[in-house]
Image: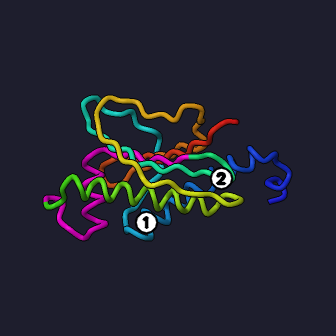
Amino acid sequence: MLLHALLPQREKLMLLAAIDLHEVNESVWTSMLGLELVACEPAPDLPGETYLFGSVTISGACDAAVMVQLPLGMARHLAATMFGQDEESIGEEEIFDALGEMANMVGGNVKGALPGDSKLSLPTVVEGRNFRWAIPGADPVTDLSYQCQAWTVRTVMFERVV
């Protein structure tokens, strides 16, 4: 940890995010939900596939955001697992609630690992096909992809550049 102490503040946050985001994903997905994540190379979005993006922002010690991206099939599986129901009985509201809660849990754990006092926004969930998601003025600090069941799950942490 001596290296960590010598780094400028921006690099400390980037280093912390890179280390903590993987640990947070493991904790939330595997320990809390029993869903195994296997790190993988990023997969391109499939044309015509419906994706969901759940996100929260962190403000305070740094301005950041955490985004979780899933294809619709994985989002339905996540909701069924989280609420202890069959996938066939899961509706749009449960899917949005589950992904919002996942973004909230991941983002809340990241917020807790950042230095200083920070606040977490309410989660936002977006669903669609063939669109881009961005935070103007922010750069991706950590972009992790995992295989979970038959789907790719992506988690990205952004930090606003001052």
- Amino acid type assigned to the residue bearing label 2 in the image: Gly
Residue 37 image point, x, y percent: 43, 57
What is the spatial separation of the Cα atoms under label 2 and label 1, in whole angstroms? 29 Å
Which region is colored magenta? 65-88
Which sits in the foreground, 44 or 17? 17
Residue 150 image point, x, y percent: 30, 50
- Amino acid type assigned to the residue bearing label 1 in the image: Thr
Q: Mark 2 points at which residue?
A: 60
Quadrant containing the C terminus is top right
Report the side of 92 relative to 107 (left or right). left
Residue 56 is inside the magenta segment: no
- Alpha-carbon neighbours of circle 1 within 10 Å: few (<14), some, or many (≥20)? few
The image quadrant that residue 86 belongs to is bottom left
Residue at x 54% of width, y 31% of height? 136
Q: Which colour scheme is used?
A: rainbow
Residue at x 47% of width, y 41% of height? 41
* SS for dot 1: helix
The image quadrant that residue 118 belongs to is bottom right
Q: Name the residue under label 1.
A: 30
Image height check: is 65 above or below 98?
above
